[in-house]
Image (cartoon, rainbow, N blue to C red):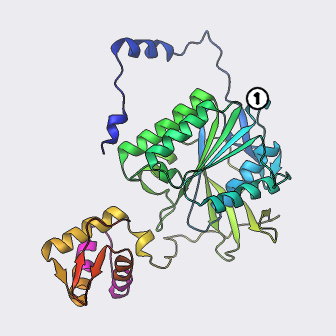
Amino acid sequence: MDYMKEIKEISAEQAIILWQASRLSLSKIYEKAPEILKVQGSVIGTLGNFSASIGKAKSKKTFNVSAIVAAALKNGTVLRYVAELPEEKRKILYVDTEQSHYHCLKVMKRILRLAGLPDDRDNEHLEFLALRKYTPEQRIRIVEQAIYNTPDIGLVIIDGIRDMVYDINSPGESTRIISKLMQWTDDRQIHIHTILHQNKGDENARGHIGTELNNKAETVLLVEKDKSNGDISNVSAMHIRAMDFEPFAFRINDNALPELIEGYRPEAKKPGRPEEEKFDPYRHISEQQHRIALEAAFGLKEEYGYKDLETSLIKSYMSVGVKLNHQKAVSLITMLRNKRMIVQENGRKYTFKPDFHY
């Protein structure tokens, strides 16, 4: 699929019109973007811009965003988030691309309870879309229609921006979806907040889309587990255009709601690389790396016995930047078998299934 076909050519006449419309003039008055989301007085979200939350798996990113939405829903304070949406921009659209309807409903109820609102009936200011079953292309179209056809919309959450593209490492796709965020926020004068996973080995947002988000977002919030207590998540500004804010922390209380921890001080980060977490060949190696390495290994031989397979995979994965020892190779082979990327049929040797579904 050629994603660049989405880039529409414009005529010279249209370009001239856009050129003239884009010229700044000192004789005109340009209003400052309305500030709708703050943390302790620091602006993290304005209308006409977008922001992001990043964090590793299980860091409680969705709980954190639930607090942002609840603050916007009540136009008040939740955790350290303070929301001030204009009366004509009170509608919130929450888009989830990953979870089942059951889990999306749990998030929706959590948001309502955090805002002090009834959780047994729909709220006129909150619309929740569960888009797990759709393709990235369909998700973009659905969200676009919702944004342009929802009156009084002010805030949009996209929980799983990674699922709006087929390949997070595609420069073309990443540029396209970030351009969409910029277009939607500008055209509708709304704020969009997106959620994206972090890389495993460092603190960068994952893939080319993560790089684009870091470059274009007005704020990138980092949500991470406390080093000494895994039940605590702390929130800091990884990137912020406005004044920085003091990091804060929350835990999940007995009512399954995020609760602020007063007086929290995060443990100072140790210099050097972060401690390496347990190797997971599914999460730590991309589909593209798997495919290239497997095609390289099985391009040499069509089938392998176990020991030869391990030796060959250690070499081929090294070529895509993945260093494997014996223990990691065993874990990798188990995962490849479970995903039926390689198969061992009738007690025979291992063969490659190039049409695997990742």
147 in magenta: no
- Magenta stretch: give its range: 313-332
In-image side of 210 versus 335 (left or right): right
- The residue to which callout 1 is attached is 88
User: Which residue is rendered at x = 80% and y = 63% of the image?
Assistant: 259
Image quadrant for the C terminus?
Answer: bottom left
Query: Which x, y percent locates residue 121?
Result: 80, 51
Query: Which x, y percent locates residue 318?
Result: 27, 73
In-image side of 61 versus 1 (left or right): right
Three-letter amino acid code of the residue under disc 1: Glu
Residue 215 in view of the camera: no
Question: Picture quarter containing residue 154?
Answer: top right
Q: Is residue 266 above or below residue 136?
A: below
Disc 1 crowd, CA 10 A, few/some/many (<14, 14-19, 20+): few
User: Which residue is rendered at x = 54% and y = 70% of the image?
Assistant: 271
Q: Mostly what secondary structure, the magenta segment?
A: helix
In-image side of 121 versus 162 (left or right): right
Q: Secondary structure at mark 1?
A: helix
Query: Which x, y percent locates residue 17?
Result: 44, 12
* Front residue of 104 and 257: 104
* Residue at the extreme left of the image, as rendered: 300
